[in-house]
Amino acid sequence: MICYNILQEIADENGLLLYPAKTQTTYPDFTLMKSEDDKNKIAVDVKTTYRRFLKDGVPSGYVFTLGSYASYMRDGRKNITFPYSEYAKHYVIGFVYTRNEYSAEGEMFDIRDLAAVPAPYKDVEFFVQEKYKISGDKAGSGNTENIGSFRTNNMDILINGEGPFSNLGVEIYENYWSGYKRYRGEKTYDSLDGYFDFLEKTGTDVNYYKKLYEIWKETH
C-alpha cells in the first residue's frame, strides 16, 4: 500500500501510467509506462524478507526471491503483464525486517487498546535497486523456480547493487537465468563457474567475463 502511493506520485510527476498487476502471480507488481504501446516500460516488484540470527545473535545471510526463471525469462510472455522484451528496466523495492517476538499470533485486544497492538515486525530497512544488480547465482528457494538475490547480511550491498551480475551486466544475467539448471530436459549449470564452463564447451570465449567475476569475488 505504501509503495503504490509513492509510485503513483512518480508516475504523475513524469507523465507516466501506473499499471498494477491483475493477479498476485503475475510479474511485475507494477508497470510504469507512457502507454501500452510503450517499448521502454519499467517493471517494479516489491519484495520482503526477514532477518535470521545465529545462536550468538549475529545476523545470518538473508535472501529474496526475485521472480521466476522458468516462465517469462524463457518464453517472454508467461506470467508477465506485458511481453518481457517491452521492459527496459526491472527494479526491486526491497524491505528487510526483524520479526517481533512480542507480537503473538491470535492475541486479542479491546478496541479501546488498538494503539497498543504490537506490530509483527520491527527494525525495517529498505532499498531500491535494479534487479540484476542484486541477483545471486542460486535459486531463492528449494521447491520453486525462483531467482535468488545475492545472500548477504550487509544491507549496503543491496542498497548499492553489488551482486555478482553488477560487474557482468544485465545481458549475462538474463542469459544465465534463462538457462539455469534444467531447460528442456538438458542439465545445464547451477553456479556462475558452471555457467562459464558450460559456455566454453559450446565454443564461446568467456575469458573477459571470468576475469570480471574473479575481480568481484576478491572484494565480496
Image (cartoon, rainbow, N blue to C red):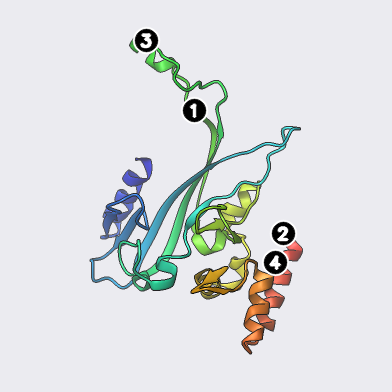
- Decide: is 34 above or below 157: below
- Whole-angstrom CA distance, mark 2 to mark 4, is 6 Å
Disc number for residue 120: 1
- Whole-angstrom CA distance, mark 4 to mark 1, is 37 Å
Picture coordinates of residue 196 (x, y %)?
Answer: 66, 77
Q: Quadrant of residue 99?
A: top right
Dot 4 lies on which element? helix
Disc number for residue 185: none
Amino acid at dot 1: Pro
- Which part of the image, by quadrant, shows the C terminus? bottom right
Q: Earlier in the sequence, mark 2 or mark 1?
A: 1
Q: Which residue bears the numbered disc 3?
A: 110
Amino acid at dot 3: Asp
Q: Which residue bears the numbered disc 4?
A: 216
Q: Which residue bears the numbered disc 2?
A: 220
Picture coordinates of residue 188 (x, y %)?
Answer: 60, 73
| Marks 2 and 4 close (CB-CB < 8 Å) | yes
Q: Residues within 10 Å of mark 1 (few under 14, many from 20)?
A: some
